[in-house]
Image: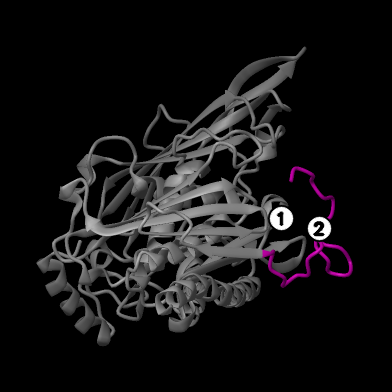
C-alpha cells in the first residue's frame, strides 16, 4: 500500500484536509452520490445494485429450505457471503475468499443480524426440522473505496426486494402455493464508515483515501438511532474522543441517508 | 461450563457467576512459557486458557510478501478442537480468519514497523479453552509475547470487553453472558497513548449505553494493564537477579 505514489498523495490529501477539502471536491462529511436499483436479476429471489460514486456492488438473494441450527430450532437461517470479483480491481485475485472478503461479509452479516432486520421466526416452516435459508451474496463489481457501506446498502436493498415462495402445510407436507410473499423485514440498518487520516475524521472514504488512511470505523445504525454493530479496521488507532465523535457522525449520516432512500 | 442460568443478573446486581457489574474475572498471566518461540505468553482469564507465541523479526516466507519499507506483522488466531463444548473442526473458520485480521490490526499500531524493513513478525495464538472474550485475552497475551521476543513497542496492547446483559451494562462477559446477553463490545487499548486499536460491537445499544460500555471496557483494560506489566517484570526481574550473582 505504501508505494511512493501513495506517499505523495498522502501529503496532498493531508494539505487539503487541513483546509477542510478533499481530492474529489467533497466536504469532510459528504457522502458520494448513492444510486440503488432493485430487482435486476430475475432468477434471484431478490437483488439490488448499489452505486456509491464509482464503487459498485451487486447483491443477490436466494431463498432455499434447509435445517435450522440446533440452538435456534424455530428460526430461519441467514448466510452472507462476499466475493471480491477480479474484474472489480487490479488488486483482486481469483481464488478462495481472503481475509478482506471474509471481513466484509461478516461486517455486513452482523449489521443485518444484530439489528434483527429479518424476522427470522417467520422463516420457520417446521420447528427443528425445516426452515427457510436466506443466502445473501455480495458481488463487488467495481472497487473505488468504502465497500462496507456500499455492500450493506446493496444487501439490505436486495432483502427488501426479496419475494419468498408462498407455502402452506397440509397433513404435515409442505405445499408451495401460487404467488409470492415479501421477506419479513423488521428493521432497516444503515452502515456508516468513518475514516481517520492524520487525526481528521471523514466519511465515505474513496479508494485513494482508503490507501492512505490510518484506520476506519464502521457502525450499523437502526431506525431508532441505536448502534447495532461496530467494526474498527486498519492498522492505526482512534482516541476515545474520536470514537464518540465518529458515533455521532454515524448517527447523523444514517438519518440523512435514510431520508434519501425509498426503503 | 454448560449450565445456562435463568437470570443473568439478580435484583442486587449480582451476576450469574457471582460477580458485580464492574468486576473482572480472575486473571493470571505468565511470560516466557515456550522455549522455541522468540517470545511467548500464557493467559488464564476466567476459564479461558490461551497460549501466544511470537517469532521475529525474521526473514519473510514466502519472500514476495516482504515489504521494502517496513515489517509485516502476521497473526493467526486458532481454536483447539477441544476448546469448546462441541468439537470444533481444526480447519480455520471464517470467524477465525476475521479475528486473526482484527487482532493483527489491534497489535500493529504498537510496533515500529518502519524500523524493520523486509522482515516479518509472526504471532500465533492458540485457544486451548474458550469461555467468552477470547479475542481480548488473545490480544493481551499476544502483546506480551511480542514484548518478550524483544520487539520494540510503543506500548503494550491490552484488551477487555464490556457488554449489556438484561438491562445492565457490565464488564468482562463470560461465555453464557456473551451468548445470552444483549450486546458485546470488545476493546483493545494502549493505555499510555490513550489509543483504541480494536473496537467491535454486536447487539443493540443506545448511544449512551455504547459510550458507557466503551468507558467501562477501557477501565477494565487499565486494570489488566497493571497485571500485564507485572507479568513481564516477573520474568525479567528473575533474569536480572540471576545475572547479578
Q: Chain of mark 2?
A: B
Q: Position of residue A224 (x, y in %)?
A: 63, 65
B186 horizontally vs B22: left or right: left
Q: Residue at x 61, y 48 (%)?
A: B130
Q: Residue at x 71, y 32 (%)?
A: A73
What range is drawn magenta here? B1-26
In space, the residues marked 2 and 1 are separated at their CA atoms by: 9 Å
Tell which residue pokes out farthest to the front in this image. B245
Q: Which residue is mark 1?
A: B177
| Circle number at residue A240 | none
A10 horizontally vs A125: left or right: left
Question: Is the C-beta separation of discs 2 and 1 under 8 Å?
Answer: yes
Tell which residue pokes out farthest to the bottom in this image. A19
Give above or below for A243 relative to A140.
below
A87 horizontally vs B237: left or right: left
Quarter of the image where the N terminus of chain A is located: bottom left
Q: Which residue is mark 2?
A: B16
Closer to the chain start, of discs 2 and 1, is: 2
Amino acid at each position: 500500500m505504501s508505494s511512493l505514489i501513495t506517499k505523495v498523495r498522502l501529503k496532498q490529501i493531508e494539505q487539503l484536509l487541513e483546509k477542510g477539502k478533499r481530492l474529489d471536491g467533497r466536504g469532510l462529511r459528504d457522502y458520494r452520490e448513492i444510486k440503488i436499483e432493485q430487482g435486476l436479476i430475475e432468477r434471484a429471489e431478490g437483488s439490488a445494485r448499489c452505486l456509491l460514486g464509482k464503487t459498485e456492488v451487486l447483491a443477490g438473494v436466494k431463498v432455499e429450505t434447509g435445517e435450522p441450527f440446533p440452538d435456534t430450532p424455530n428460526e430461519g437461517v441467514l448466510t452472507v457471503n462476499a466475493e471480491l470479483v477480479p474484474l472489480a480491481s487490479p488488486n483482486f485475485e481469483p481464488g478462495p475468499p481472503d481475509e478482506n472478503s471474509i471481513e466484509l461479509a461478516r461486517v455486513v452479516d452482523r449489521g443485518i443480524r444484530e439489528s434483527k432486520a429479518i424476522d427470522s421466526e417467520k422463516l420457520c416452516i417446521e420447528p427443528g426440522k425445516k426452515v427457510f435459508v436466506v443466502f445473501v451474496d455480495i458481488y463487488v463489481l467495481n472497487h473505488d473505496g468504502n465497500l462496507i457501506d456500499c455492500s450493506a446498502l446493496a444487501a439490505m436493498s436486495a432483502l427488501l426486494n426479496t419475494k419468498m415462495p408462498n407455502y402452506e402445510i397440509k397433513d404435515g407436507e409442505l405445499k408451495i402455493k401460487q404467488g409470492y410473499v415479501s421477506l419479513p423485514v423488521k428493521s432497516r440498518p444503515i452502515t456508516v464508515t468513518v475514516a481517520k487520516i492524520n487525526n481528521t475524521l471523514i466519511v465515505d472514504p474513496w479508494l485513494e483515501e482508503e490507501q492512505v488512511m490510518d484506520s476506519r470505523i464502521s457502525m450499523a445504525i437502526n431506525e431508532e438511532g441505536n448502534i447495532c454493530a461496530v467494526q474498527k479496521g486498519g492498522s492505526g488507532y482512534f482516541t476515545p474522543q474520536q470514537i464518540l465523535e465518529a458515533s455521532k457522525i454515524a448517527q447523523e449520516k444514517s438519518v440523512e441517508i435514510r431520508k434519501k432512500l425509498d426503503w | 461450563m454448560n449450565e445456562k442460568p435463568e437470570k443473568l443478573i439478580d435484583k442486587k446486581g449480582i451476576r450469574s457467576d457471582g460477580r458485580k457489574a464492574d468486576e473482572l474475572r480472575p486473571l493470571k498471566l505468565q511470560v516466557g512459557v515456550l522455549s522455541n518461540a522468540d517470545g511467548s505468553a500464557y493467559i488464564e482469564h476466567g476459564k479461558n486458557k490461551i497460549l501466544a507465541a511470537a517469532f521475529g523479526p525474521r526473514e519473510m516466507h514466502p519472500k514476495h510478501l516482504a515489504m521494502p519499507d517496513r515489517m509485516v506483522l502476521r497473526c493467526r488466531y486458532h481454536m483447539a478442537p477441544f476448546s469448546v463444548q462441541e468439537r470444533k473442526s481444526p480447519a480455520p473458520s471464517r470467524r477465525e480468519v476475521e479475528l486473526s485480521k482484527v487482532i493483527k490490526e489491534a497489535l500493529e499500531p504498537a510496533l515500529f514497523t518502519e524500523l524493520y524493513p523486509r522482515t516479518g513478525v509472526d504471532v500465533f495464538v492458540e485457544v486451548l479453552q474458550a469461555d467468552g472474550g477470547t479475542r481480548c485475552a488473545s490480544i493481551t497475551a499476544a502483546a506480551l509475547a511480542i514484548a518478550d521476543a524483544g520487539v520494540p513497542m510503543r506500548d503494550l496492547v491490552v484488551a477487555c470487553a464490556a457488554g449489556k446483559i438484561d438491562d445492565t451494562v457490565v464488564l468482562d462477559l463470560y461465555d453464557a453472558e456473551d451468548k445470552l446477553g444483549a450486546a458485546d463490545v470488545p476493546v483493545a487499548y494502549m493505555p499510555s497513548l490513550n489509543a483504541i486499536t480494536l473496537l467491535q460491537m454486536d447487539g443493540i445499544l443506545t448511544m449512551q449505553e455504547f459510550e458507557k460500555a466503551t468507558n467501562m471496557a477501557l477501565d477494565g483494560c487499565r486494570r489488566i494493564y497493571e497485571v500485564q506489566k507485572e507479568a513481564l517484570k516477573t520474568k525479567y526481574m528473575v533474569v536480572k537477579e540471576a545475572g547479578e550473582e
